[in-house]
Image (cartoon, coloured by chain):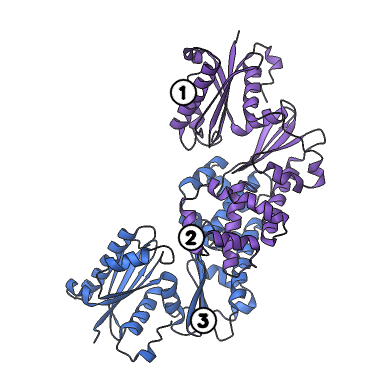
Chain colours: A purple, B blue
């Protein structure tokens, strides 16, 4: 019999853990630093263990028990390279099931049914579950993908701002704001790019939605292109009427009202967050149900 | 009387020097490593001195003479930050006039008359001389500018390739080639971006022109957008009939036949290279002509 399960949600800014009993009832929680296994495997592993230990501690359990508890981990950076296999060998749990952060977000948002999520944060990615089979689209990062993400919106805005500075396009209130924020010196924008991480570009994104609502032409151009990029992906997913669509991430609420009526009709509020999704998968994977009920292909 | 002048052309891949007499006749040449003063000021300075010493040596001059010879330097990275002032204090020449690499390229290509150049290499930048006054457009680097440059073309190609992989756009022979070069694994494209420099993206550019000529739809889309970006800048420059336009850089010959008839009519072969431009400016700046003939504002 499994007494306890762990869910872990690890991303680029922090790692959360939840300890639950075999019914899925949360007994303790923990929180620590970043856990992107691609950018820092050792640090991610340390933060995962730290958050898990906190959760055990909050539940009043002996930390030694950690090696007897199975865990489902949803982590950033699992889709690239050998990091997932390397992490497996480093984790102290009885058994570790490592999923992408997007996979546990899907489970948290729509449960184990068919449907889709689209995550718009610093990056962007789409997950679809159809007939129980999960597939992902996008999520290829700031340089080559992540269309409509905060980072891409920010980069587009700074590019258009420099085009306006050079009189290639018309300046707008927003591009003038941005130039003023950089002391009206284009060289400072270029300096910004030298060390800027995607998250640094992403900080300009909310301003874009504000100005688009005020009919700023440059903001409307950039947001309009992003919405078209989103709908191009959604069109490819070819969602059915009984497949709900949840938008997640920091820009979800900003994009939701801008989608066309076809997708408005499919929009649903997410049932729960990614950490609850990790616990759902853990409960399904590690409880002593007959294998046929486990839905292992989800 | 000035006996000798030095011209220096320093860029991201190498530094060239030419020693000339006061008539501009080249007596010796030198060549050394990269001289981008923004990315490596100390290394750039060492390479500049090395190339200059080689040029003196090739001309049979005592290296001690270096402190008696004035130089015009055209260097990458002069438009950003305090590096130009810092370099001034480190150089051994009698007098150092530091210009952008684009400025000496303009002088080399069209001499001291009015006209424009557009440089399409790893980056892109436009220089215009009108009524003797020089201005530049673009050149803001890979992340936010350099539209139609090799690096931006390469990045666009890899982005479209991933969109084709995800079935958001139709794949083409070129996107299939690129996927095959990355072992049909999108994760390897993402890995490529982690350490890729603009020049690494730029290596994909010639392939794009080849495939566009073979009517590859994705290549034609990317090149078509780049040509539109170029013409948007040229339209802004509002070139007159008597203002020649030279295309420079590794992609110049590839873009030239794609421009519209208005710009085809203005195209001219460059008179000389950037190093000859540095020598021209040196001759004008440091020869003992009456000030009225020096054209100091060019």
Residue drawn at point x = 77 percent, y = 40 percent: A238
Q: Which residue is tagged 1?
A: A89
Q: Which residue is tagged 3?
A: B115
Instruction: Indicate left or right for B280 with B217 as reference.
Output: left
Residue drawn at point x = 51 percent, y = 21 percent: A54
- Can residue B184 be seen in the rendering of this structure? no
Q: Report the Cα–Cα distance between label 1 and label 3.
A: 65 Å
Mark 1 vs mark 2, foreground winner is 2
Check the residue under mark 2 and report the chain it is in. Answer: A
Quarter residue B185 falls in = top right
Give the secondary structure at mark 2: helix
Check the residue under mark 1 and report the chain it is in. Answer: A
Q: Position of residue B28 (x, y in %)?
A: 26, 75
Q: Is residue A289 above or below residue B39?
A: above
Quarter residue A268 falls in = top right
Instruction: Give me the disc on residue B99.
Output: none
Mark 1 and mark 2 lie on one chain; the one further toward the N terminus is 1
Locate the N terminus of chain B and report the quarter of the image it occupies.
bottom left
Q: Are marks 2 and 3 on the same chain?
A: no
Q: Which residue is tagged 2?
A: A188
Q: Nearer the viewer, residue B83 or A140?
A: B83
Q: Is residue A285 above or below residue A270?
A: above
Extreme residue in the top direction: A1
Q: Position of residue A298 (x, y in %)?
A: 68, 26
């Amino acid at each position: 019999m499994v007494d306890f399960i762990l869910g872990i949600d690890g991303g680029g800014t922090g790692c959360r853990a939840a300890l639950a009993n075999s019914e899925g009832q949360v007994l303790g929680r923990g929180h620590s630093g970043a856990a992107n296994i691609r950018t820092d495997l050792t640090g991610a592993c340390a933060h995962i263990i730290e958050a898990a230990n906190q959760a055990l501690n909050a539940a009043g359990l002996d930390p030694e028990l950690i090696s007897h508890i199975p865990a489902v981990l949803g982590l950033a950076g699992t889709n690239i390279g050998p990091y997932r296999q390397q992490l497996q060998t480093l984790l102290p749990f009885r058994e570790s099931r490592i999923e992408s952060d997007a996979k546990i977000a899907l489970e948290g948002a729509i449960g184990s049914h068919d449907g889709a999520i689209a995550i718009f944060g610093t990056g962007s990615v789409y997950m679809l579950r159809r007939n129980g089979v999960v597939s992902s689209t996008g999520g290829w990062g700031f340089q080559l993908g992540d269309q409509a993400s905060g980072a891409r919106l920010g980069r587009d805005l700074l590019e258009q701002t420099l085009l306006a500075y050079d009189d290639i396009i018309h300046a707008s209130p927003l591009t003038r704001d941005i130039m003023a924020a950089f002391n009206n010196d284009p060289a400072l924008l270029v300096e910004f790019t030298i060390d800027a991480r995607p998250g640094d570009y992403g900080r300009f994104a909310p301003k874009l939605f504000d100005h688009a609502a005020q009919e700023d032409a440059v903001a409307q151009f950039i947001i309009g292109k992003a919405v078209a990029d989103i709908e191009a992906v959604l069109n490819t997913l070819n969602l059915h009427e009984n497949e709900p669509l949840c938008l997640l991430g920091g820009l979800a609420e900003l994009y939701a009202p801008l989608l066309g009526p076809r997708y408005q009709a499919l929009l649903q509020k997410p049932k729960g967050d990614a950490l609850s999704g990790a616990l759902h998968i853990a409960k399904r994977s590690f409880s002593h149900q007959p294998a046929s009920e486990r839905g292992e292909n989800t």
